[in-house]
Image (cartoon, helix red, strand yellow):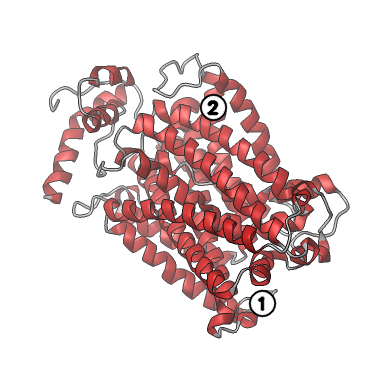
């Protein structure tokens, strides 16, 4: 194997007689890349990292008020399954592409191959901004959740730490705590994928157990169960919904705003693609990881959120709490000891969710830098020979996340920015694939949607358009400034510099040119590791 390196994806078939890990390495070689990261993750671990980043106990809990304070219970009963279905279609389309091109930073690689250098470059920047926003939003949300839920029992002054309008004091304390949380997650990632994988495996089981336990507790202690709440529409805009959304009489508009709850929650499943080069049997594991993480998050998330709605003593009073509606319902229904235990488990799940996000985002940075797409790419693409992790990329992601938190410390705005950028980065390679499917793109992977791919791609385009519209509405209109500013900056950088400089991932003859250096790169890493 050391002297025979396949020169194109067509060589996938010739590796059938090899072990899965050796076959994965040959596939990676055939795309012009060396096996520098440590490949040791199995299918469940690949699933677990996406499931951990989706984390229904993070976005589902912290954004619950955005759903309830739009049109009430119907936002959960109808809105959650609807948005989950669209997310599942994205996972199917992305799994189809990822099965054909199983590389770290997959979205960027897919966009470049299917749509050209410019599409790949924009995809990478959108995905990077989105993942950094995910990390910032989850850690800010975790801080606010822990303080809001456990603070009163521990004597913390929650009115000062979490005022309705942020103050210099509350923002400073939040920033300091979020910095400490983020850097601890970066340190765990720094120490290697084996430790990270163990924690994300644990996180997967924890999310299952805690969400089921939460649902059972709420059903058991609910004063009454009125299932009609799940299909009842009521206007909770303005004061009626704790001023989560501005006052409006347009129920359709309100319902669409409520979709930000599932849209933000069910993001990050591209982590299965970002860790492709650390996964054994990646061409099969990637689609399984993405699809199953979305499916099970959707099912368990719907049951859990429905239980919260059904357990509320009064939907009107719960909606009136705004972003604090979940904690209020728990305080009214669940006994103190059990409530505290569930709050601790939820807080831990949110911490591990962000830890997995650091893993995913750092692999995105590594892959993009490997092809020269970032400033200081030479440093950002380096792998630690001791830990076999992209150390510089990990700490860069952590620092960028903290800076974004300082720029906009408001959770709902961070969540909106995250959802828009993430899904736009999902859409670009999917849409590019639509135009070249069965034309220039003819080599598919083991997971093949066949004629369903174009249909699913068109639905994804429509779904993303709706998300962008609702994501920039007040009070999240600051998200529009971030999007426009990022778009202008991206255009200036691309046309001013990157269009001539950026080569993109290796394609065609460039793959052959890289073959000579692949074995040298792998040997250097192995020597340093040993």
Could you say which is closer to the camera, residue 125 or residue 173?
Answer: 173
Q: Which residue is mark 1?
A: 163
Whole-percent x and y of residue 139?
Answer: 50, 63
Are the residues flagged by discs 1 and 2 in contact, CB closer than 8 Å?
A: no
Question: The N terminus lies in which quarter of the figure?
Answer: top left
Horizontal side of residue 276 vs 211, given as left or right: left
Name the N-terminal-most of marks 1 and 2.
Answer: 1
Residue at screen point 64% across, 78% down: 167
Residue 207 image point, x, y percent: 48, 54
Residue 133 appears in the rendering:
no
> Picture quarter containing residue 68?
bottom right
Taking depth in this image into account, of 278 and 71 the one nearest to the observer is 71
Give the residue drawn at x 64%, y 64%.
Answer: 221
Question: Would residue 115 be seen by someone viewing this image from the given angle?
Answer: yes
Q: Secondary structure at mark 1?
A: loop
Report the residue marked by disc 2. Answer: 432
State the image coordinates of residue 364 (x, y, percent, origin top left): 41, 45
Residue 157 coordinates in the image, percent (x, y): 60, 84
């Amino acid at each position: 194997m050391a002297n025979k390196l396949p020169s194109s994806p067509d060589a996938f078939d010739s590796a059938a007689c090899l072990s899965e890990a050796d076959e994965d390495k040959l596939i990676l070689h055939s795309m012009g890349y060396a096996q520098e990261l440590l490949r040791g993750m199995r299918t469940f671990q690949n699933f677990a990292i996406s499931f951990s980043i989706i984390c229904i106990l993070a976005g589902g809990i912290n954004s619950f008020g955005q759903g309830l304070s739009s049109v009430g219970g119907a936002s959960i009963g109808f809105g959650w399954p609807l948005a989950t279905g669209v997310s599942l279609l994205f996972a199917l389309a992305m799994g189809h592409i990822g099965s054909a091109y199983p590389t770290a930073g997959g979205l960027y690689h897919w966009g470049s191959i299917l749509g050209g250098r410019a599409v790949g470059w924009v995809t990478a920047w959108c995905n990077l901004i989105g993942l950094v926003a995910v990390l910032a939003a989850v850690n800010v949300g975790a801080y606010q959740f822990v303080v809001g839920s456990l603070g009163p029992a521990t004597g913390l002054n929650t009115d000062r730490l979490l005022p309705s309008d942020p103050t210099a004091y509350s923002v400073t304390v939040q920033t300091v705590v979020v910095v400490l949380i983020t850097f601890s997650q970066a340190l765990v990632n720094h120490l290697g994928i084996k430790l990270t994988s163990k924690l994300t495996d644990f996180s997967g089981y924890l999310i299952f157990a805690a969400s089921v336990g939460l649902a059972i507790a709420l059903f058991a202690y609910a004063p009454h169960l009125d299932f009609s709440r799940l299909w009842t529409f009521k206007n909770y805009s303005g004061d009626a919904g704790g001023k989560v959304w501005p006052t409006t009489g347009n129920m359709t508009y309100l319902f669409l705003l409520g979709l930000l709850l599932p849209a933000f929650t069910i993001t990050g499943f591209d982590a299965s693609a970002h860790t492709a080069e650390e996964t054994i049997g990646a061409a099969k594991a990637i689609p399984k990881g993405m699809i199953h993480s979305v499916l099970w998050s959707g099912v368990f998330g719907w049951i859990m959120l429905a239980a919260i709605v059904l357990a509320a003593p009064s939907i009107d009073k719960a909606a009136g709490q705004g972003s604090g509606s979940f904690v209020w319902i728990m305080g009214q229904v669940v006994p103190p000891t059990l409530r505290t235990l569930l709050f601790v488990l939820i807080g831990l799940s949110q911490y591990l969710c962000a830890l997995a996000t650091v893993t995913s985002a750092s692999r995105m940075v590594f892959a993009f830098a490997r092809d020269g797409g970032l400033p200081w790419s030479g440093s950002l693409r380096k792998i630690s020979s001791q830990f076999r992790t992209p150390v510089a990329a990990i700490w860069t992601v952590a620092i960028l996340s903290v800076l974004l938190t300082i720029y906009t410390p408001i959770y709902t705005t961070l969540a909106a920015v995250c959802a828009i950028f993430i899904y736009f980065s999902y859409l670009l390679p999917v849409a590019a694939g639509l135009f070249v499917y069965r034309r220039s793109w003819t080599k598919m992977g083991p997971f093949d949607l066949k004629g369903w791919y174009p249909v699913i791609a068109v639905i994804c385009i429509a779904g993303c358009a709706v998300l962008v519209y609702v994501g920039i509405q007040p009070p999240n209109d600051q998200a529009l400034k971030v999007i426009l500013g990022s778009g202008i900056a991206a255009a200036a950088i691309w046309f001013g510099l990157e269009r001539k400089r950026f080569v993109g991932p290796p394609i065609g003859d460039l793959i052959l040119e890289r073959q000579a250096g692949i074995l040298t790169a792998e040997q250097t890493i192995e020597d340093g590791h040993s």
